[in-house]
Image (cartoon, rainbow, N blue to C red):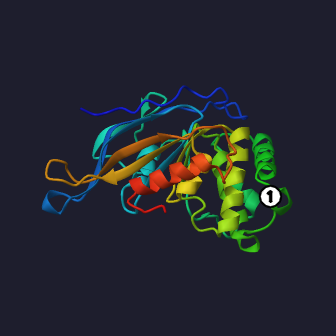
Amino acid sequence: MTAVLHPPQPRADARPGSGTPALPVSFRGLGRAFGTGPAAHTVLRDVSFDVVPGEVLAILGASGCGKSTLLRAAAGLDAATSGSVAIDGEPVRGVDDRCAFAFQEPRLLPWHTLQANIAIGLPAGVSARDGKAKVARLLELVGLQDFAKHRPREVSGGMAQRASLARALARNPGVLLLDEPFGALDALTRIKMQDLLLEVHRAEPTTVLLVTHDVDEALQLADRIIVLGREDTESSPAGATIVRTLTVPGGRPRDRASAELARMRTSLLASLGVDGH
């Protein structure tokens, strides 16, 4: 029987400033295998959980355990072998415009300005006037209003990543999918980007699924954390599934020096097979 992990109640602030509602996401018995026959490689198996509107949920796990595959299934960029994903009760079938995706690399078009790159994320049919106003508001939100006319090569990696985040938000997504969005940044810039994401989420409180390898990042940003892992035994088929779910107490921003977070960090590292001492 598939165990369904019941999340907390919807957040009271779960509506973005744009008026687009943050949306719930449900995974049911999700599995993904690549290849067929004896050569088939199972990455995910029997993954079931819910994300409530406005929640920030972090996904932790070792490299290759299917974290990014899970996000791609939610966005409709990859088809599950078994099970399903639903957004707001409607199954995901193909690329889903209720989601926006931000990757580890900014993936900006080098010949466009930051302003033009952000505008690429605008939904189809938005008027020129409304689109211009939306882009201007997002530039201010991520602190790039003075760099709107710069091209990606003319700004730092952190600034490019801010533009990537703004481009994703331009779609007014009900669900924001973040795949290691700060993984390529230096430690100080990464902390600044984490703080920025919290500020953005307060202004645009969409539902967020965040894939990360960084336990501290997960503890700083998430309401809940799920850990993916393998239980490869003779009685348990191959492929990663949910091995742990953890609710992070307290509001955000959190004290990075908190003793409680330090205990949770040690516990999470142990779940990942790492000695946290």
Which corner quadrant holds the N terminus?
top left
Q: Position of residue 127 (x, y in %)?
A: 74, 40
Q: Residue furthest bottom?
A: 153
Residue labelled with disc 1:
144
Picture residue at 73% right of the left edge, 58% below the top: 116
| Residue 96 image point, x, y percent | 49, 42
| Corner quadrant of residue 17 | top right
Residue 65 appears in the figure: yes
Image coords of residue 235 (percent x, y): 15, 47
Name the residue type under label 1: Leu
In the displayed structure image, the side of residue 179 where residue 228 appears, left or right = left
**What kind of element bears circle 1?**
loop
- What residue appears at the point 58 percent right and 58 percent down from the top-left corner? 181
Relative to 247, residue 231 above or below: below
Report whether residue 120 is seen.
Answer: no
Which residue occupies 80% across, 58% down?
144
Q: Few, some or many C-alpha atoms within 10 Å of disc 1 (few <14, some 14-19, many ≥20)?
A: many
Rendered image quadrant of residue 162: bottom right
Residue toward you, 178 or 268: 268
> In the image, is residue 193 above or below residue 45?
below
Relative to 42, is 143 on the left or the right?
A: right
Looking at the picture, how far across and down is residue 153, in whole percent?
72, 74
Report the front residue among 189 and 31: 189
Q: How many marks?
A: 1
